[in-house]
Image (cartoon, grey):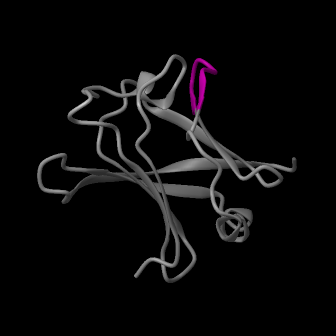
Amino acid sequence: MKEHTEQSGDTPKANALVDFVYGVTDENPLKVEVAINEDGRVILFHNKVFKNDLSWLEFDLGTNKLDFVLDSGQTRDFGMPLHRSVSKHMHNTHQVLAILLDDQTGDAKEGHYIPLILHQG
């Protein structure tokens, strides 16, 4: 059971999160959801494969902004600030479970942990 979720499915734009994934079209957009599990763990669901592995995520506790970072240092933001209620869970998190969902069925295909770096804004 999820306590809170945030979603982003905005139209692709330059330097957006869609730059990091394969297969985004107007008919098949990138869907990302940040959820808090019953036990307080943060889970990131996504429906597109990342072009390169994510190195880490960064979360600014002051602005509630979530950034995705590659090894090269390239950064893309989530596209919208997360709800304030997510902040308390992020504050106690060192890694986020990222789960790739099947685009057709919505079933989980694979998952892995991504380190989370916190910033005080």
- Closer-to-camera residue (66/14): 14
Q: Residue at x 60, y 45 (%)?
A: 80
Residue 117 vs 3, above or below: the answer is above
The image shows residue 12 at horizontal and vertical percentages of 42, 26
- On screen, residue 89 versus residue 28, left or right, reads right
The image shows residue 84 at horizontal and vertical percentages of 71, 65
The image shows residue 51 at horizontal and vertical percentages of 36, 24
- On screen, residue 96 versus residue 1, left or right, reads right
The image shows residue 5 at horizontal and vertical percentages of 49, 66
Q: Residue at x 29, y 26 (%)?
A: 22
Instruction: Residue at the far right: name it.
Output: 121
- On screen, residue 60 versus residue 54, left or right, reads right
Residue 49 vs 20, above or below: the answer is below
Magenta residue span: 69-76
Instruction: Residue at the far left: name it.
Output: 104
Residue 72 forms part of the magenta stretch:
yes
Q: Residue at x 71, y 68 (%)?
A: 92
Q: Residue at x 30, y 36 (%)?
A: 29
Residue 33 vs 65, above or below: the answer is below
User: Quadrant location of the N terminus?
Assistant: bottom left
Residue 12 forms part of the magenta stretch:
no
